[in-house]
């Protein structure tokens, strides 16, 4: 009896999953396979939050497959060898996988294709699985190989027809084949993570999405930059691991509503960065645009930034939230990133690595390209932009509620006073003096 393999990577869902859908149509039996790739695990072993999310997402994926008569087949090892072994064991003639954009995924794809061809098995790549629009489909009229400016990309992206979301398969028939148990995060070498981390998978993600689209999204345009309100979708980790499909979310959001439009616009940013990285995978580590000035080495300042002890409450609140919850609102990411690269003039890669240690949604395209945007080496057309944390605080946390939540040592300061503790005479033993000076102190 023939079989096909749906190789899950970061598309950990049964709804609107082109690779799973195609595998179910291609063979009488399907092996829904996830390989705990030891090469990748070695790279992310110091990212305990993502490890926790991954194992939760695999558990929910397994439950979704079981509800359809199937199950997740988990293996651990070198991905190419494991897929080839499962193909041989299950007599599979095709392997279906989502198209991805990183250099690592390109190498994996080439190696899989070559290895599978030796056993008469075909590799099929499914675009627009991780992004809403195929990351390689849109090209500007200028002849460039990717869009370097967001606004024209957005116009084109909005005009691009997207598929109707695919239903989850009604039934998944898995051949008899051995599987490892889904591991505990500790078994993957994950150390202690954020104490307030919240994790989930497709089932949890779909519940959050339903709630978000049923009402809160309408307020998004007004509150998205106000960190104290927590008025953003909170879906980024579900998108990163593919527990939710970006294409389905765009399809379902109502862009005639200002909130829905503002939300979908952010998903277009996600696609925008993915298409840049797909074309230039080296910019995960190299500057997208050359920078003439050297970066500063300042271990003391970097340590203060990481610990949330810079003396600027708006910066420190973001950094404390990052370690406590493994997430940070977009506005706080901008403020903290600007402080590191523009004020302390420390290399953006130092900041990107720290974010990747803690962020549960840490993503090569989004993290690295947003850092480059803030550093002035990326796609920002105003590369000299600096965010003054005091002005940002006055504008986006006028009553100090966000800072009060994350800096208990300043909680006694009322209203906006909390943003300038040095004026209120707070002793350095309670909260540090600012490590650099800013206009408006
Ligand atoms: C320095 C820096 C680093 C970042 N690192 C990451 C990262 O590693 N992973 C990540 O997913 N996002 C990253 N972002 C983008 C953004 O801050 C987060 O996506 C967002 O805060 C996640 O919260 P949310 O799901 O509630 O977003 P919402 O505001 O509800 O937005 C909806 C979705 O749109 C996408 N999105 C929103 N803003 C951006 C953006 N600026 N760029 C790309 N996609 C966006 C995300 O998928 C998000 O889930 C970073 C931003 C900065 C400034």
Image (cartoon, rainbow, N blue to C red):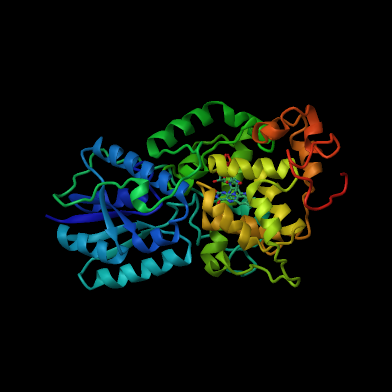
**Where is the N terminus found, in terms of image quarters?**
bottom left
The answer to whether residue 330 is seen in the rendering is no
- Residue at image location 51% in from the left, 64% down from the top: 278
Q: Which quadrant of the view contains residue 349?
A: bottom right
Q: Is residue 82 left or right of residue 243?
A: left
Please state which of residues 277 and 417 is positioned toward the viewer in this rendering: 417
Indicate the position of residue 63 as horizontal and vertical percent values: 29, 37
- Residue at image location 58% in from the left, 31% down from the top: 217
Indicate the position of residue 205 as horizontal and vertical percent values: 44, 36
Indicate the position of residue 136 as horizontal and vertical percent values: 50, 62
Indicate the position of residue 404 as horizontal and vertical percent values: 69, 31
Q: Is residue 150 left or right of residue 50?
A: right
Please state which of residues 201 and 91 is positioned toward the viewer in this rendering: 201
Q: Which quadrant of the view contains residue 244?
A: top left
Which residue ends up furthest to the front in the rendered image? 429
- Residue at image location 43% in from the left, 47% down from the top: 242
How many numbered tags mark residues here?
0
- Residue at image location 31% in from the left, 69% down from the top: 113
202 in relation to 385, above or below: above
**Where is the C terminus found, in terms of image quarters?**
top right
The answer to whether residue 437 is seen in the rendering is yes
Q: Which quadrant of the view contains residue 290?
A: bottom right
Please state which of residues 236 and 317 is positioned toward the viewer in this rendering: 317
């Amino acid at each position: 009896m023939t079989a096909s393999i749906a190789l899950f990577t970061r598309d950990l869902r049964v709804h609107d999953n082109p690779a799973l859908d195609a595998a179910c149509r291609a063979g009488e039996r399907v092996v829904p396979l996830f390989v705990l790739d030891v090469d990748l695990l070695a790279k992310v072993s110091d990212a305990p939050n993502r490890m926790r999310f991954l194992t939760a997402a695999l558990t929910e994926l397994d439950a979704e497959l079981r509800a359809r008569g199937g199950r997740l087949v988990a293996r651990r090892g070198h991905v190419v060898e494991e897929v080839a072994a499962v193909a041989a064991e299950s007599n599979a003639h095709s392997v279906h996988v989502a198209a991805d954009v990183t250099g690592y995924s390109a190498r994996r794809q080439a190696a899989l294709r070559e290895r599978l061809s030796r056993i008469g098995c075909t590799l099929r790549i499914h675009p627009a699985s991780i992004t809403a629009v195929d990351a390689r489909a849109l090209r500007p009229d200028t002849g460039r190989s990717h869009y370097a400016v967001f606004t024209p990309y957005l116009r084109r992206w909005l005009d691009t027809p997207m598929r109707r979301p695919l239903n989850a398969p009604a039934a998944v028939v898995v051949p008899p084949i051995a599987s490892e148990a889904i591991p505990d995060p500790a078994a993957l070498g994950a150390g202690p993570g954020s104490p307030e981390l919240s994790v989930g998978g497709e089932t949890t993600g779909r519940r959050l999405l339903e709630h978000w689209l049923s009402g809160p999204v309408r307020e998004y345009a007004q509150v998205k930059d106000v960190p104290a309100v927590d008025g953003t979708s909170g879906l980024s980790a579900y998108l990163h691991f593919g527990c939710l499909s970006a294409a389905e979310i765009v399809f379902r959001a109502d862009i005639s509503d200002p909130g829905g439009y503002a939300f979908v616009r952010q998903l277009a940013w996600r696609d925008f960065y993915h298409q840049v990285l797909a074309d230039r995978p080296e910019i995960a580590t190299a500057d997208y645009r050359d920078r003439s000035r050297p970066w500063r080495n300042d271990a003391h300042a970097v340590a203060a930034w990481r610990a949330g002890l810079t003396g600027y409450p708006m910066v420190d609140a973001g950094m404390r939230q990052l370690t406590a919850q493994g997430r940070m609102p977009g506005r706080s990411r901008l403020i903290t990133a600007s402080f590191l690269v523009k004020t302390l003039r420390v290399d953006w890669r130092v900041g990107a690595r720290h974010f990747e240690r803690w962020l549960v949604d840490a993503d090569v395209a989004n993290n690295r390209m947003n850092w480059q945007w803030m550093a002035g080496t990326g796609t920002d057309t105003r590369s000299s932009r600096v965010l003054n944390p005091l002005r940002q605080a006055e504008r986006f946390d006028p009553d100090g509620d966000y800072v009060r939540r994350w800096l208990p040592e300043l909680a006694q300061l009322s209203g906006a006073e909390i943003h300038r503790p040095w004026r209120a005479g707070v002793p350095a033993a309670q909260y540090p003096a600012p490590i650099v000076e800013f206009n408006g102190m």
